[in-house]
């Protein structure tokens, strides 16, 4: 499993090349795999067992464009894009496949039925009652069968298998579109450099930056830095007032305020091309 | 193919149960773990624990991290999405309309979600469809246009639904929609409304007298408009510090925020020609309330504009855009006017009117300055994390911070002042 590439869905509507799309992952196993690779992402969907809160959400996992680009460029993942994938998959759906899906659902029901009957009998035995199924309890059982709305799609999976999404040309084109639609293209180099140093990164607008960097899994460790949107090392000015306010802000949220300058924004840029400066407000006491 | 796998698993389970009765318990419980989760009903959200400064390479930390991750993924995979057959509600997505219909609508979501047509079919917008499907309240299907019956329409997964979003912007808007819905707010797509429709007008008519009065006040305002001529100070005679402050404040031009319904109506009339802005609000939001009616929702409590911070074409609203947004705002009026200013309390305020105790005027003023008047909410999407920013129109110019008007009635002294100056002028001539 760990060898296979992870599919990342780009949410962007039908053949919409002008907008890059939102990178999302729908399979829990894939999300776990990403976590082990150092990608926390942001869970964005309603948790069905606790649908009235925002503290802990469920599938889908939303990735930053930079994260998705890194994964695809390093051969860990590939993109699936466009709503036409779903529509085409549904239109080519054969009667046989529909029947299969139906059978699958029936099997699922049968399993549930068996499970519930066993439970029921166990309970009856515990109470010392006769273990006969009455009509009413059977109808109750039928109405309590669970219909699940799955997270990830069989339709898309089948389509992906048939269509070979994972070919270099398509992936390169999608990467290009995603990158062109980023607000600040230099951020990707900053991301790469920090990722290379083993940081977990997450979006940082909450703390007044582009990223926040964690030394390990955000589940267990506090973040250390708020990283500002990438500057062009040679050309972009850095306002003193910005330094002061940023430094104060960083200290206020107990993080290092980090400015990153990208030296050369070319395709071949490596992590050496990014310089980092950290600023701390020293006016304590 | 996956069907085959399931069958095989089932067969082996049955066979092993037949062959080896000792292992029965273990085998069965293992086999049915994915079904057992369906009958769990308790809420499982992992607790937030203590965090460490950074990894120190110890096994203890590793174990803690492992436990935290396990708790997280357990609650993710334990939360089955869906419903039991008894409560099953089908929704059919119609791709041509980009919305879905529920032929046999039932459930409490109908209170605030969906639009029922004449045939009793409930129509959901795409946001509503995805939100309800994500909660497991409804089961989504794809409607084939050529078929009449629903038997062969394939069911959709969450992944399919997300892929059917028309644009990234729509998906971002959905994230904000779902966030607010989960908190219990009533959210609807913002529609361009008629300017101050019937609900507001009848209230304005009885106060015709009031509007005359305000017109009269306007007349005075003409006298009071600052004349930036140095001579003015030679002609004026100041007898109190209040007058000086007052005159000084007139020298500084400032924007007066509309505070009453009349003000708002006046402004609406003025801006009717300016056309609509490039930005318009995404959602109308109401606070949770039992008496909500879909057909006559009344004015929303908030209006929300959704913006993604990380796209190429992102710009924070400029001042002129904000001004236009404020003008196009259609939120509840009574919430923005403090009683002391509006003079008359809007009748719908009802229960809220029984205010506790009077507050000191300067405290009230502080509150006014802090709270401001009209406001809207900017939902900034940052790759999945939403920041809600409230933008409020404040009015510092109209507040007399240095000089307390309550302690010595400034309006009176002003009018006297005016008369005096005019007589002075005539005398001078």
Image (cartoon, coloured by chain):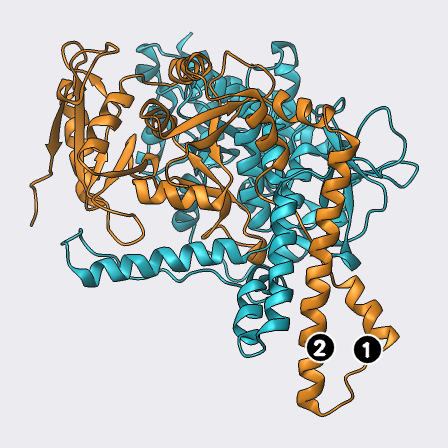
Chain colours: A orange, B cyan
Q: Is residue B233 shown left or right of residue A19?
A: left
Residue B325 pos. (x, y %): 54, 23
* Residue B365 higher or lower than B145, as above or below: below
Q: Name the residue tied to disc 1.
A: A133
Report the chain holding disc 1: A
For residue A120, the mark is 2
Residue A66 pos. (x, y %): 34, 26
Residue at the top extreme, as displayed: B429
Q: Is residue B411 shown left or right of residue A126?
A: left
How many marks can you see?
2
Q: CA distance from mark 1 to mark 2?
A: 9 Å
Q: Are marks 1 and 2 on the same chain?
A: yes
Report the chain holding disc 2: A
Q: Residues within 10 Å of mark 2 (few under 14, many from 20)?
A: some
Assess whether mark 2 and mark 1 are in contact (beta carbons under 8 angstroms).
yes
Question: Which element is circle 2 on?
Answer: helix
Q: Is residue B394 visible?
A: no
- Image quadrant where residue B385 sits: top left
- Image quadrant where residue A262 sits: top left
Q: Of B26 and A242, which appears nearest the observer?
A: B26
The quadrant the N terminus of chain A occupies is top left
* Residue A159 higher or lower than B5, as above or below: above
- Image quadrant where residue B242 sits: top left
Residue at point 67%, 81% (across, down): A122
Q: Of A246 and B56, which appears nearest the observer?
A: B56
Residue B255 pos. (x, y %): 45, 23
Residue at point 20%, 63% (across, down): B60
Question: Which element is circle 1 on?
Answer: loop
Residue at point 43%, 54% (across, down): B73
């Amino acid at each position: 499993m760990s060898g296979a590439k992870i599919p990342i869905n780009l949410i962007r509507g039908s053949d919409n090349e002008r907008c890059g799309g939102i990178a999302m992952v729908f399979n829990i196993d894939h999300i776990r795999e990403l976590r082990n690779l150092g990608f926390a992402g942001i869970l964005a969907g309603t948790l069905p067992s606790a649908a009235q809160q925002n503290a802990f959400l469920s599938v889908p996992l939303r990735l930053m464009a930079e994260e998705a680009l890194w994964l695809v460029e390093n051969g860990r993942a590939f993109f699936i894009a466009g709503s036409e994938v779903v529509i085409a998959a549904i239109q080519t759906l054969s009667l046989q496949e529909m029947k299969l899906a139906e059978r699958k659902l029936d099997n699922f029901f049968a399993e549930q039925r068996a499970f519930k009957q066993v439970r029921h009998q166990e309970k009856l035995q515990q109470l010392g009652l006769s273990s006969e199924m009455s009509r009413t309890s059977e109808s109750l059982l039928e109405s309590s069968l669970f219909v699940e709305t799955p997270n990830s799609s069989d339709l898309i999976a089948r389509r992906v298998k048939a269509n070979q999404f994972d070919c270099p040309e398509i992936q390169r084109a999608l990467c290009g579109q995603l990158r062109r639609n980023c607000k600040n293209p230099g951020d990707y180099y900053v991301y790469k450099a920090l990722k290379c140093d083993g940081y977990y990164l997450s979006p940082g607008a909450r703390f007044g930056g582009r990223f926040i960097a964690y030394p390990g899994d955000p589940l267990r460790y506090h973040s250390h830095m708020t990283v500002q949107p990438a500057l062009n090392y040679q050309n972009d000015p850095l306002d003193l007032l910005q330094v002061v306010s940023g430094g104060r802000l960083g200290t206020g949220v107990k993080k290092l305020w980090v400015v990153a300058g990208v030296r050369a924004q070319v395709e071949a840029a490596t992590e050496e091309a990014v310089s980092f400066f950290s600023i701390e407000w020293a006016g304590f006491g | 193919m996956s069907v085959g796998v399931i069958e095989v698993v089932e067969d082996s389970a049955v066979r092993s149960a037949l062959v080896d009765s000792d292992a029965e318990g273990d085998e069965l419980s293992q086999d049915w773990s994915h079904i057992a989760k369906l009958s769990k009903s308790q809420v499982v959200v992992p607790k937030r624990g203590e965090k460490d400064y950074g990894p120190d390479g110890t096994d203890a930390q590793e174990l803690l991290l492992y436990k935290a991750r396990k708790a997280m993924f357990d609650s993710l995979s334990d939360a089955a999405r869906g419903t039991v057959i008894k409560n099953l509600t089908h929704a059919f997505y119609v791709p041509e309309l980009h919305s879905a219909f529920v032929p046999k609508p039932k459930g409490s979501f109908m209170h605030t979600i969906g639009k029922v047509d004449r045939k009793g079919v409930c129509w959901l917008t795409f946001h509503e469809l995805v939100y309800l499907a994500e909660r497991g309240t409804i089961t989504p299907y794809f409607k084939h246009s050529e078929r009449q019956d629903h038997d062969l329409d394939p069911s959709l997964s969450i992944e399919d639904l997300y892929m059917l979003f028309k644009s990234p912007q729509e998906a971002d808007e959905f994230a904000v929609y779902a966030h607010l819905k989960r908190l219990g707010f009533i959210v609807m797509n913002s529609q361009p409304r008629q300017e101050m429709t019937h609900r507001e007008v009848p209230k304005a008519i009885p106060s015709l007298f009031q509007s005359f009065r305000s017109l009269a006040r306007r007349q005075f305002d003409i006298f009071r408009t600052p004349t930036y001529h140095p001579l003015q100070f030679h002609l004026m005679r100041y007898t109190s510090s209040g007058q000086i402050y007052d005159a000084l404040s007139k020298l500084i031009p400032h924007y007066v925020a509309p505070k009453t319904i009349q003000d708002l109506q006046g402004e609406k009339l003025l801006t009717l020609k300016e056309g609509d802005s490039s930005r318009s609000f995404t959602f109308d939001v109401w606070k949770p309330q039992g008496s909500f009616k879909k057909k006559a929702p009344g004015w929303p409590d908030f209006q929300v504009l959704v913006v993604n911070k990380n796209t190429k074409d992102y710009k924070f609203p400029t001042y002129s855009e904000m001004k236009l947004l404020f003008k196009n705002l259609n939120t509840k009026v009574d919430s923005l006017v403090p009683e002391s200013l509006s003079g008359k309390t809007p009748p719908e305020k009802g229960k809220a009117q029984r205010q506790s105790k009077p507050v000191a005027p300067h405290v009230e003023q502080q509150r006014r300055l802090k709270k401001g008047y009209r406001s809207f909410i900017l939902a900034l999407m940052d790759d999945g994390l939403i920041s809600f920013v409230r933008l409020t129109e404040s009015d510092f110019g109209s507040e007399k911070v240095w000089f307390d008007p309550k302690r010595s009635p400034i309006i009176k002294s002003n009018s006297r002042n005016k008369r005096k100056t005019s007589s002075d002028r005539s005398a001078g001539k």
